[in-house]
Amino acid sequence: MRVYLESLGCRLNAAEITELASRFAGAGHNVVEAPEAADVIVLNTCAVTAQAARKSRHRLRTLHRRNQRARLAAVGCWVNYSPDGAAGISGVTWALPNADKPRTIELLTGQAAEPSVLWEPGHGGYTRAFLGVQTGCDNVCTYCITRILRGPARSRSPVAVVTQVQSLVAHGAQEVVLTGVSLGAYGHDLGLENGLAALVAAILQDTDLPRLRLSSVEPWDVDEQLLRCWESPRLCRQLHLPLQAGSDAVLRRMGRRITTAQFARLVERARAISPDLALTTDIITGFPGESESDFAEGLAFVAAQHFARLHVFPYSERAGTPALRLSGSVPVRARRARAARMRALGERLAAAYRRRFLGRVLPVLWERRNAAGRWRGLSDNYLEVVTDSPDDLYNRITSTRLVSIEGEQLRAEPQFCL
């Protein structure tokens, strides 16, 4: 059977679809790169916002139009959120919620399978390998639907994770990205002390992986032991700390377990250990009860943190979340206007961060080359770098000097010190 797999939304979704690809391959099926070539199409869906749900619906319909003879499987969060909506889309044969993901192959084919090759460079268009080490969440953020759709926090064993990383390295991985719904809570359900920090230390000690990267970590899960992990040059200099709001009044209504003062102290400590660390964050605008003065306060706080990148979302009502019971709904137009202002600030902050590295030499992992022969890659501190080198740079890490800025990218010299 020929299978096409695709993912929307978070990096955990990407990690799950990568592992599912290996399981299909292990069962003797052919994983294809285009939906038109498939007998079965699997889409890992997202429902974190109303826009994400719309994208899931639209993508399922698009995939069906592109190959009407293929059977379509909708899996994941949007299926949990709207099972009837997913099942009712033309072409959808299976609508599998998150609980059924581990049994996807069995449910689609009637046979179980284990991975034969966990990962190969280029799957999903990345040379980085996304590895889900944790799912679920025990936090009580009032706006979040993901914890409801994914259930309580659950972690893979450290031995299993290290073994998987060793397999990834054996198959050519230069960088592994650890992902999870609540990555910082890794190991809490297993009774592990300093779970994520200990896992990072074990990977760095017991594997030859050149680069390890962490996805989003809640600020209250970042302690001194985890921060010390950035003393290793093999841990990529990027830390994504979701802030969500720069106003303490809004943070309290969100159910966030941190104040702006605590967040600022954490940022200061992180930069003391790794001065060039790319600190990135998430911001929600127009949360219920957010006044204009709350937003202005948040805008000023975000500016003062000098983030390297912002991910900004207007607040989106999600059925079943406590935020729906809060008063002070902000008009949708105002939410979007505030999001536009916050994104404009994010663009200025990102540009300032890029300028810091002009003339510097950074390690870049090269991922792809376009039709014009231009290579694109990522530095360890998550800067997008391009070069016109004629060399084959695919899945290689090279040290390269950054010589100019081209929009949101930095251009590198075509000569490399390997």
Image (cartoon, rainbow, N blue to C red):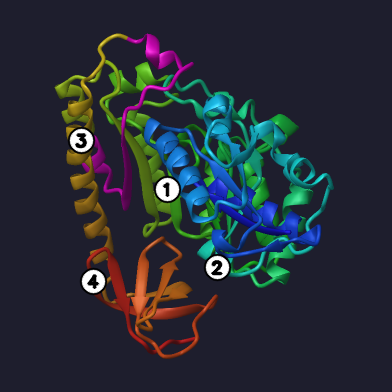
What's the mark number on residue 342? none
Q: Is residue 96 above or below residue 345?
A: above
Report the Cα–Cα distance between label 3 and label 4: 26 Å
Of label 2 and label 4, which has the lower sequence position? 2
Of label 3 and label 1, which has the lower sequence position? 1
Is 313 in the magenta? yes
Of label 1 and label 2, which has the lower sequence position? 2
The magenta-colored residue range is: 300-326
Disc 4 marks a residue whose amino acid type is: Ile
For mark 2, give the secondary structure. Answer: loop
Identity of the residue drawn at 49% across and 25% down: 145
Disc 1 marks a residue whose amino acid type is: Ala
Report the Cα–Cα distance between label 2 and label 4: 24 Å
Asked if the residue under mark 2 is in contact with the one under mark 1, i.e. CB atoms within 8 Å, the reply is: no
Disc 2 target residue: 127
Of discs 3 and 1, which sits in the foreground?
A: 3
Mark 1 Cα shell of 10 Å, populated few (<14), some (14-19), many (≥20): many
What's the mark number on residue 405? 4
Mark 3 Cα shell of 10 Å, populated few (<14), some (14-19), many (≥20): many
What's the mark number on residue 270? 1
What's the mark number on residue 299? 3
Asked if the residue under mark 4 is in contact with the one under mark 2, i.e. CB atoms within 8 Å, the reply is: no
Disc 3 marks a residue whose amino acid type is: Leu
Disc 2 marks a residue whose amino acid type is: Thr
